[in-house]
Image (spheres, rainbow, N blue to C red):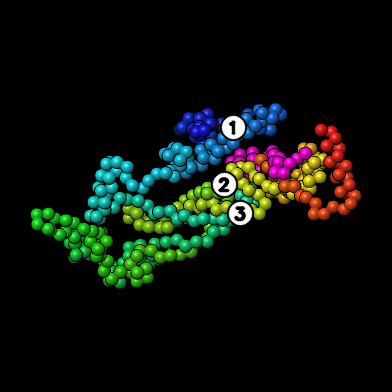
Amino acid sequence: MDKRDYYEVLGVDKDASESEIKKQFKTLAKEYHPDKHTDEEKAKENEEKFKELNEAYSILNDANKRSIYDQYGHDMGRSVQQAPDDLEDILRMAREGFMSGFGFQQPQGPMPITMGIPLTLKEMYEGVNKKMKYSVNKLCSHCNGNKYIPSDGGCVEACTSCNGTGMRMTTQGNMTFGQPCQDCNATGKKIINGCKHCNATGFEQVEQVIDIDIPKGISVNAQVRIPGKGNEMIFNGKGVVGDLILVIIGIQDSKFVREMNDLHCTLDVPIVDCLLGEEVSVETIDEKKRKFNLKVGTVNDDKFRLVGLGMPIQNTNMFGDLYVHINHIMPKELNEKEIELLKELKNSIDNGK
């Protein structure tokens, strides 16, 4: 079945603000929470709607993911090809390439630095403060990013190989062809007696440390953008600092498996307790013991849903659920009395058929 549009799922317009999306999600989440109905069929129907709501909210509540969704839909750009799609794209690329060959680069700020930040499931559950150490490019402290120091005899001159045009022209017959000048990297300029401290690159690499607060319930592959903590460069004659983007990497947990905001775990239970429907306890992600009752005749891999014991739903006071999958523990050996009791039980069951 095709997925419904996320805006339709939440019942908001495509230009809805972040606060409108959050408010609508809270309203619908309360309405469709599976625990609201005792009727099993209705609860199951609400469970599907609740999962659909969570999925839609996880995308539309994240500015970066929402932007990608608005552009590509549910595909999220995974199938977009890098080749130009039509003549207009081809002409645009050719025009930009032609202009850049003459030294007219399209203005742009520093590219953001992207780093992975590994987090345990417990850290994503509780939220955590992380101290990050990484390297960035800063404007050279000696030449201030100019790549040369006038007082040391440094200067900029027009490239003699291309006469300052950035292109080297060749003629074949009646045709004239241009190629980007290799001597000046198509800039039309050459640095004379460049800064020795940075080897005429204009920047130096330094290490810096930041503290970042990771919110509760953040998901794997989520991106946290930190403005002004990236590389520095000269842009329009001024030093401009780019951004740092942290991508959340999940460290596999030994006990729990995460699906959206829900958690799954396996609980080993003696088969006798499963047959009798005994009370059992399970340790949750917050390291607390929670008790629940098995149903009589619980079979292997039956699962029990513990409402509100999953992951926090980011930017809300709500939680996902914990699903406990039952694993039968069979006795390794039986004494004579136990064997006799089991035989009596088998006879009783057989006679009752």
Say what amino acid the circle numbered 2 marks. Ser
- Please give the label number shown on residue 89: none
List x then y, in percent, for residue 262. Answer: 63, 42
Would you say 38 lies left or right of 162 here? right
Q: Residue at x 75, y 40 (%)?
A: 298
Q: Which residue is mark 1?
A: 49
Which residue is at the front of the view, 261 or 112?
261
What is the crowding at mark 1: few (fewer than 14 residues within 10 Å), some, or many (at least 20)? Answer: some
Would you say 58 lies left or right of 123 here? left
* Residue 126 vertical placement versus 33 (above, below): below
Report which quarter residue 306 is drawn in: top right
Mark 1 falls on what kind of element? helix
List x then y, in percent, for residue 163. Answer: 17, 61
Would you say 206 lies left or right of 46 here? left
Task: Give the farthest residue toward the right.
Answer: 337
Q: Residue at x 76, y 49 (%)?
A: 329
- Look at the image and give the residue range highlighted in magenta: 297-320
Say what amino acid the circle numbered 1 marks. Lys
For the question of whether residue 41 can be seen, the reply is yes
Q: Which residue is mark 2?
A: 219
List x then y, in percent, for residue 214. Answer: 58, 50
Q: Which residue is mark 3?
A: 252
